[in-house]
Amino acid sequence: MLCVALGALFVTGCSELRAVRAVLDASPDEGAVPLRVEFHTSGSMYGASGPGTFALDFDDGTSLVQGDEFGVLIPHVYEHAEEYTARA
């Protein structure tokens, strides 16, 4: 069984972050390996300072995924049965 916990979503790229609403959802959040998880940032909104960038860390040793657009679907496959905390 694999479990994926979600950490905080941190947005960078602006000299000052103002009221950024950052939300990271994953589906499914558990299952047999290999497990394909789809991460969604659709509930996130930029603050008054405008767009920034984000980096998603899947917590399994793979490369970070970087982006600058909220509302996208980011798929990832977990190969090993462990507990992970994905963070962006």
Image (cartoon, helix red, strand yellow):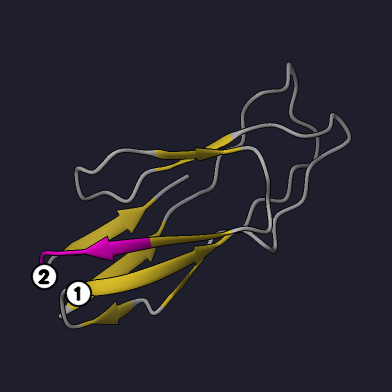
Q: Is residue 79 above or below residue 19?
A: below
Q: Which mark is residue 67?
A: none
Picture coordinates of residue 13, whole percent (x, y): 66, 23
> Could you tell me which secondary element the residue under label 2 belongs to?
loop
Q: Is residue 78 magenta?
A: yes
Circle 1 is placed at which residue position? 2
Picture coordinates of residue 74, whole percent (x, y): 48, 58
Q: Which residues are magenta?
A: 76-80
55 or 74, which is in the foreground?
A: 74
14 or 18, which is in the foreground?
A: 14
Dividing the picture into quadrants, the one containing residue 42 is bottom right
Instruction: Check contact, mark 1 vs mark 2: CB within 8 A.
Output: yes
Give me the residue at 37% from left, 70% from top: 37
Give me the residue at 62% from left, 33% from top: 53
Question: How many labels sit on residues?
Answer: 2
Circle 2 is placed at which residue position? 81
Q: What amino acid is at disc 1?
A: Leu
Q: Is residue 47 magenta?
A: no
Q: Is residue 31 above or below residue 66?
A: below
